Amino acid sequence: MVSDGEALLLRYRVAPDVDATIVHVTGEIDLSTSTTFADAMTHALAGRTSVVVVDLEDVTFMGSIGLGQLVKAHDRAARSQRFLRIADGTAAAHRAIEVSGLDQVLSVFATVDDAIAG
């Protein structure tokens, strides 16, 4: 089953795979799209795989609210003995994660394939 969601500036697609549930996120993650991004995390964590990969390759802006939601999703995954991994392939997402210091807390990878492999 594939779940899709959309706000004016943000789209996501949750695609369960054999090895991981992958959340493809496109657009801007800010206050106006925070509910949609939270929905994406909820749908992804509802899957049955032990690994959830958040693909931020097509994210053009990531605000602090998006970073906070990644931390919340990370905590929810850990409580259910699952792994949340971030593929932050764009400069916008990578820079926000790195500047905030969350690259020391979250499992961050350059690509989705790297994140799946762990």
Image (cartoon, rainbow, N blue to C red):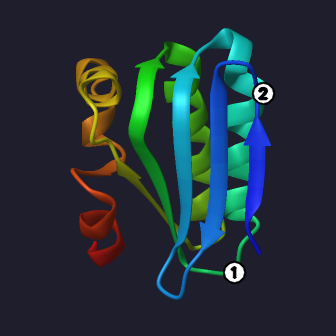
Tag 2 near tag 1, CB within 8 Å: no
Rendered residue at 44%/30% (across/down) = 59
Picture coordinates of residue 19 (x, y %)?
47, 84
Rendered residue at 49%/27% (across/down) = 67
Along the line of sight, the residue nearer the viewer: 96 or 9: 9
Rendered residue at 29%/69% (across/down) = 113
Residue 97, label in figure: none
Q: Which residue is mark 1?
A: 48
Q: Is residue 27 left or right of residue 104?
A: right
Bin the neighbour count of mark 1 within 10 Å (Cα to Cα): few under 14, some 14-19, many 20 and up. Answer: some
Rendered residue at 24%/66% (across/down) = 114
Q: Which residue is mark 2?
A: 35
Q: Is residue 109 left or right of residue 64?
A: left
Is any atom of residue 11 visible in this view? yes
Q: Quadrant of residue 72?
A: top right
Up the image or down, 77 lies above or below 73; here it is below
Q: Is residue 26 left or right of residue 116?
A: right
Image quarter in which the N terminus is found? bottom right
Up the image or down, 27 lies above or below 70; here it is above
Find the distance from the CA under tag 2 to the CA under tag 1.
23 Å
Kind of residue at disc 1: Arg
